[in-house]
Image (cartoon, coloured by chain):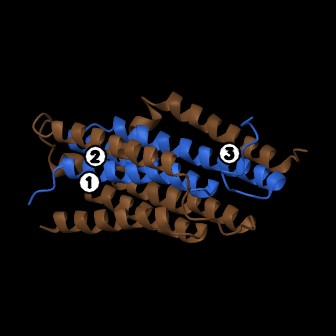
Chain colours: A brown, B blue
Amino acid sequence: MIGPILFSVFAVAAIAGALGMLFSKNPVSSALWLILTLFCVAGLYLTLNATFIAVVQVLVYAGAIMVLFLFVIMLLNLAELPRLQTGDGKRFLGYVGACGIFAALMITTSSALGVLPEPVSVGVAAETGSALNLATLLFTQYALPFEVIGILLLVATIGAVMLAKRRFV
Amino acid sequence: MEITINWYLSLSAILFVIGVLGVLFRRNVIVILMSVELMLNAVNLTLVTFSQSMGDAAGQILVFFVMSVAAAEAAVGLAIVIAIFRNKLTVDVTQINLFRY
């Protein structure tokens, strides 16, 4: 009985955070709303019994990435910008496109209604999402992609330092 | 009432569309980057949902890699924002039109 309640609370809070990010004027409050959404997504991972990914979500997203965003916002001396872009024709086109994407996603979701196989039991799911199982896969079957991701992060760090340091005339 | 995986997929669709709206309608480059992060999160939620409901951990390995790529993207994107801000003193995408003409 606790499952549906937890899901509803996290889902409503996640959508509220996303809308707050979309509509708040100040970039700092946008970032704080997004942190609420990221925490709620971590909670949703917990309701799915994906414990390892939930912890990584809090550490990497809510911890590292959002601190980086907040740091850059504070670093730049930002003027207040108008909240949303103007331009009527383009704006209407944007709404139509977003509604189209939403409709396509919902049609796909509803067409999956009877087709998908039955979910596995809670015990199996908890074992699937455990750190032990994921680490075993990560260091055996997916060892090469894991190393390549390390190289990617190194290159991104070097590139970020170079871009932020150099003065483009 | 049972929460099936369709609920998670619908929530993911809603979050993704909010991210799309943010990319289309906001003017601040930093908020646009945050919207991209939101879209990546929506996709991650879908991957974890399918992975957990089928008992196959490969989807969560992919989520791990998506998170790493998102971190790299945020670092490089924000460095580019800082470099642009040094030259033009703005983060308004309607003002950053160097390649337009």
Q: Residue at x 47, y 35 (%)?
A: A139
- Look at the numbered disc 2 and give the secondary structure of its residue: helix
Tag shown at residue B49: 2
Work out how far the residue at label 2 is from the one at label 1, CA to CA, in angstroms: 7 Å
Q: Which residue is mark 1?
A: A48
Say yes or no: labels 1 and 3 on the same chain. Answer: no
Say yes or no: labels 2 and 1 on the same chain. Answer: no
Q: Which residue is mark 3?
A: B76
Image location (x, y in percent) of residue A82: 60, 65
User: Mark 1 or 3, which is nearer the eye?
Assistant: 3
- Look at the numbered disc 1 and give the secondary structure of its residue: loop
Query: Which tag, 2 or 3, sits closer to the chain's start?
Result: 2
Quadrant for the C terminus of chain A in the image: top right
Work out how far the residue at label 1 is from the one at label 3, CA to CA, in angstroms: 32 Å
Disc 2 vs disc 1: Cβ atoms closer than 8 Å? yes
* Amino acid on which disc 1 is placed: Leu
Image location (x, y in percent) of residue B71: 58, 48
